[in-house]
Image (cartoon, helix red, strand yellow):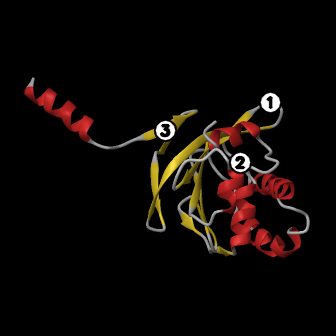
Amino acid sequence: MKSIIFSILVLLSVNVFSATQDGVTLPDTVKLSGKELVLNGLGTRKATWLGIKVYVGGLYMEKKSSDYNTFLNDKAPKQIIMKFVRDVDADDLIGGWKEAFKNATPKEDLPKLQERINTFYTYFSDIKKGQVMTFNFLADGVESTINEKKLTKIEGGDFSKAMLSVWFVNAIDEGLKKGLLGL
């Protein structure tokens, strides 16, 4: 009996917190650039009019906010984790990113971003259920890790803001947007 009570006390004393949505669990905090970021919200990306679940995403920031206009313009580090709940081929991934960049980026900004956006598209291959993409949004660019492979950082605060905007400005999936904003 004492060992059972001791085991319960040990389990209760472990500070492991997480959030779960649609069978995907993400941590409540992550470390980035020497800072602890908190989970702002979780959302599920649904595609097509059928609402097919594609991935669960989590947005991490230094402090929670439901106002994307504020945090898109601040230089503090942010992270988005995307855990896929289905297989997605590279062409569909790239097509989704193209539509998202087109919707979220002012037309006058696209020409100066286009070369870096094209480089970003080269990062994608077919994704399998359970694989993860992590994007670190920094003041000087975006660090991408896809299925545990760290890729070349894409430079520029303007690219960082443009890429983070795809989830919030003229978002393709309003449900995902609301989830990431913690609404």
Q: Residues within 10 Å of mark 3 (few under 14, many from 20)?
A: some
Q: Which residue is mark 3?
A: 19
Q: Secondary structure at mark 3?
A: strand
Residue, disc 2: 88
Q: Secondary structure at mark 2?
A: loop
Residue situated furthest top in the rendering = 1
Query: Distance from label 1 to label 2 (Cα)?
Result: 16 Å
Label 1 Cα neighbours within 10 Å, binned few <14 / some 14-19 / many ≥20? few
- Tell me if mark 2 has few (under 14), some (14-19) or many (20+) residues whose alpha carbon lies within 10 angstroms of its own: some
How far separated are the C-alphas under marks 3 and 1?
A: 26 Å
Looking at the rendered structure, the secondary structure element under dot 1 is: loop
Identified by mark 1, the residue type is: Leu
Q: Is residue 143 visible?
A: no
Q: Position of residue 49 (x, y in %)?
A: 83, 32
Q: Look at discs 3 and 1 and give the one toward the viewer.
A: 3
Evaluate if marks 3 and 1 touch, with contact meaning CB atoms under 8 Å apart. no
Residue located at (14% from left, 33% from top): 6
Quarter of the figure with the N terminus: top left
Q: Up-down: is 165 above or below 47?
A: below
Residue 20 vs 137, above or below: the answer is: above
**What is the number of the mark on residue 50?**
1
Q: Quadrant of the C terminus?
A: top right
Q: Is residue 11 visible?
A: yes
Q: Quadrant of residue 138?
A: bottom right
Between 172 and 183, the one lying in front of the other is 183
For the point 91% across and 68% down, the residue is: 108
Question: Could you tell me the amino acid type at mark 2?
Answer: Val
131 left or right, relative to 14: right
Measured from the top left, where is residue 64 in percent x and y?
A: 55, 47
Residue 122: x %, y % from top left: 74, 68
